[in-house]
Image (spheres, coloured by chain):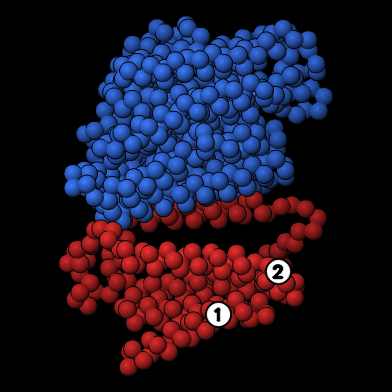
Chain colours: A red, B blue
């Protein structure tokens, strides 16, 4: 049953990722991209990686794909022009894709690189008592607490910086009047 | 996480709380005309409190947060240096940015948090904490570079710095991921053990080498040595001058401190590999830094190229990898910081009388001698010191670097170092010639506050009289130069 579902989902992923690059309307492309992400997260769920699955849903669909959608809608791209340039770039794209394919085949066939194996008894994945969200949480809030907080501070700095650099006082700027808004 | 961890992290915690408090204060007291002055004092208080904590509260020779950070005398030395530098920068920036009327609470917030990043970077002993410290520092610097957001050059500098910085962080991270994949640990000492094992069994040598070179490339981008220097002159020219002063000193001290620790602990067994890389990079950055600066007319560009050649000089001390090399790097970088901060404070005092712009073109410095002898003589002394004229402090920095090179029998390298420092003496002397002997082109307005006078005075005293207390200073460095514990 699982293997059957796996094949169905894989086929959906492959066809919809082809449609991402082949569909004429860029909005359809983004919607197919969302479908790819959604099905990939289901694949992650199959392999017991529920944390990655949820992160994929939240980050890639909730934030990145929606951002793409906004950008595509705002930019108003001329599709027919893009079609013409597509053929120009096709040989280069195929060439790069071919190189990557050769490299992947080479790496898989010649994989005598000695990766150090993680000791699975360390993390206790084998017995399914702890889900990996719990395991990550346990490590993140105890051993790597400092790193967690530092990443938070980096995000704070990025946010403040983005606001500082883009908030400009000029004539056309639209501002919100808080008092007016509350009175409504 | 234990209470002792919080105690050992208290300097950074004070800075973070101070930064957040500044942000909130700026929002709630927006209408207060004097709020920026008060914010200046708040940031100075948090800096001094954090400085006090890092000396008296933090225990030496300790690891905190599950071995993510490591405090010893070596890190303390660099932290003290960085604290002094930041206090000076905050003072001179306050006057400068107020004059340009672009001062906002965000400036102090960003400076304090980038300092947190540098402190974490200096004391890190794990590749993840090191990366996060470096990234926190860089993200703050990207924003600071484009701090004059209505000025097109500043925006350009910010974008350039951001793209190059993001690229170099990517390269660094790629190297770190390769190292992690083949050693299965993120701790510096554990990595060192794994590397020794793999060296003995003679496997994975090539792939670890590639990872190591990628890490070095990422770090070289951050300290702007040739061939990773292309961004530096543009970014230094475009950024607001006081922030250029920050760029040329404080983040470089952090990265140099980290680089030295990293090479001498984690990659100790790879010393043959990094000796060659550092040798080449040091030679070409000394040569290019000194030759390219000859033709510069903008003082900020000139100081950018001069900082490239100084970094090349520092790399000599690192690549000798002996005890005296490390000590000489500590001496050199502290002298360099003092001199550069003094010069930037002098530059920030000079304005054009007619249009009120700050002077950046060297030609316009002419006639300063008649206007203000104190400023012109301090300019001359600080530039002489950077060039390495004997009784001044810069000479001793160069001297100890050369001694360490000669003790390691690197005669060719020391000859190149001496020759390039002669070339660089030419362009420092050119500025002095313009100040002292050229006919005045335009009217200079001198805007010197009591505090910048004090800063210049202190840097002058350090430059002139270092010869007297050099032995005491070397004694301090001697106790802090031990990396391996």
The Cα–Cα distance between marks 1 and 2, rounded to whole angstroms, is: 18 Å
Q: Chain of mark 1?
A: A
**Front residue of B197 and B41:** B197
- Residue under numbered circle 2: A85
Image quarter of the C terminus of chain B:
top left
- Residue B82 visible in the shown view: no
Q: Are marks 1 and 2 on the same chain?
A: yes
Name the mark on residue B393: none
- Residue B384: where, in percent of width, then height? 55, 12
Q: Residue placed at 37% from the left, 32% from the top? A: B276
Determine whether, in the image, residue B155 is placed left or right of residue A140.
right
Disc assigned to residue A18: 1
The numbered mark 2 sits on a residue in which chain?
A
**Mark 1 residue crowding within 10 angstroms, few (<14) / some (14–19) / many (20+):** some
Which residue: 70% across, 20% down? B362
Q: Nearer the viewer, residue A33 or A180?
A: A33
Residue in the foreground of this view, choosing between B136 and A85: A85
Is residue A20 something one can see in this rendering?
A: yes
């Amino acid at each position: 049953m699982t293997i059957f579902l796996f094949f169905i989902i894989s086929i959906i992923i492959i066809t919809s990722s082809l449609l991402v690059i082949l569909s004429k309307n860029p909005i359809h492309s983004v919607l197919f991209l969302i479908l790819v992400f959604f099905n990939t997260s289901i694949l992650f769920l199959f392999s017991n990686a529920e944390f990655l699955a949820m992160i994929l849903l939240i980050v890639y669909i909730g934030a990145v794909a929606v951002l793409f959608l906004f950008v595509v809608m705002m930019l108003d791209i001329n599709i027919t022009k893009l079609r013409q340039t597509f053929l120009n770039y096709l040989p280069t794209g195929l060439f790069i894709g071919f190189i990557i394919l050769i490299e992947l085949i080479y790496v898989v066939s010649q994989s005598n690189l000695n990766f150090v194996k993680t000791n699975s008894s360390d993390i206790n994945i084998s017995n399914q008592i702890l889900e990996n969200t719990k395991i990550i949480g346990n490590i993140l809030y105890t051993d790597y607490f400092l790193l967690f907080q530092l990443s938070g501070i980096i995000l704070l700095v990025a946010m403040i910086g983005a606001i500082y650099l883009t908030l400009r006082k000029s004539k056309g700027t639209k501002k919100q009047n808080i008092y007016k808004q509350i009175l409504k | 996480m234990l209470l002792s961890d919080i105690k050992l992290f208290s300097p950074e915690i004070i800075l973070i709380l101070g930064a957040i408090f500044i942000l909130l204060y700026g929002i709630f007291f927006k209408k207060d005309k004097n709020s920026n002055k008060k914010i200046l004092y708040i940031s100075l208080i948090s800096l001094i409190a954090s400085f006090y904590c890092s000396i008296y509260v933090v225990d030496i020779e300790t690891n905190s947060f599950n071995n993510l950070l490591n405090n010893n005398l070596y890190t303390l030395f660099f932290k003290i240096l960085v604290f002094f530098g930041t206090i000076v920068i905050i003072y001179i920036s306050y006057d400068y940015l107020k004059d340009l009327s672009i001062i906002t609470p965000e400036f102090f917030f960003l400076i304090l948090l980038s300092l947190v990043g540098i402190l974490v970077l200096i004391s890190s002993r794990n590749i993840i904490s090191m990366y996060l410290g470096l990234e926190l520092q860089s993200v703050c610097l990207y924003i600071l570079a484009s701090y004059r957001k209505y000025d097109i050059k500043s925006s350009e500098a910010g974008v350039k710095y951001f793209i190059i910085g993001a690229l170099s962080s990517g390269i660094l991270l790629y190297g770190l991921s390769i190292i992690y994949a083949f050693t299965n640990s993120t701790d510096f000492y554990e990595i060192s053990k794994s590397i020794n094992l793999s060296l003995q069994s003679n496997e994975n040598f090539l792939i670890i080498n590639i990872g190591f070179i990628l890490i070095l490339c990422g770090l070289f981008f951050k300290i702007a040595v040739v061939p990773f220097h292309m961004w530096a002159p543009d970014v230094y020219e475009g950024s607001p001058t006081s922030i250029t002063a920050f760029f040329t000193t404080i983040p470089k001290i952090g990265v140099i401190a980290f680089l030295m620790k990293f090479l001498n602990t984690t990659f100790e067994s790879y010393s043959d590999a990094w000796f060659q890389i550092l040798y080449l990079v040091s030679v070409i950055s000394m040569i290019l830094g000194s030759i390219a600066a000859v033709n510069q007319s903008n003082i900020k560009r000139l100081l950018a190229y001069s900082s490239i050649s100084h970094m090349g000089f520092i790399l000599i001390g690192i690549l000798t990898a002996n005890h005296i090399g490390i000590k000489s790097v500590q001496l050199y970088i502290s002298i360099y910081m003092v001199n550069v901060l003094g010069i930037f404070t002098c530059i920030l005092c000079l304005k054009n009388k007619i249009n009120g712009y700050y002077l950046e073109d060297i030609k316009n410095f002419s006639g300063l001698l008649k206007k203000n002898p104190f400023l012109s003589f301090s300019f001359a002394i600080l530039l002489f010191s950077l060039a390495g004229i004997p009784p001044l402090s810069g000479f001793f920095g160069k001297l100890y670097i050369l001694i360490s090179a000669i003790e390691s029998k690197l005669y060719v390298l020391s000859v190149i170092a001496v020759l390039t420092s002669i070339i660089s003496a030419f362009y420092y002397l050119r500025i002095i010639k313009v100040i002292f002997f050229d006919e005045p082109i335009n009217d200079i307005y001198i805007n010197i506050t009591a505090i910048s006078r004090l800063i210049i005075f202190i840097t002058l005293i350090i430059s002139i009289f270092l010869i007297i207390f050099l032995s005491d200073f070397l004694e301090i460095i001697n106790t802090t130069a031990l990396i391996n514990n």
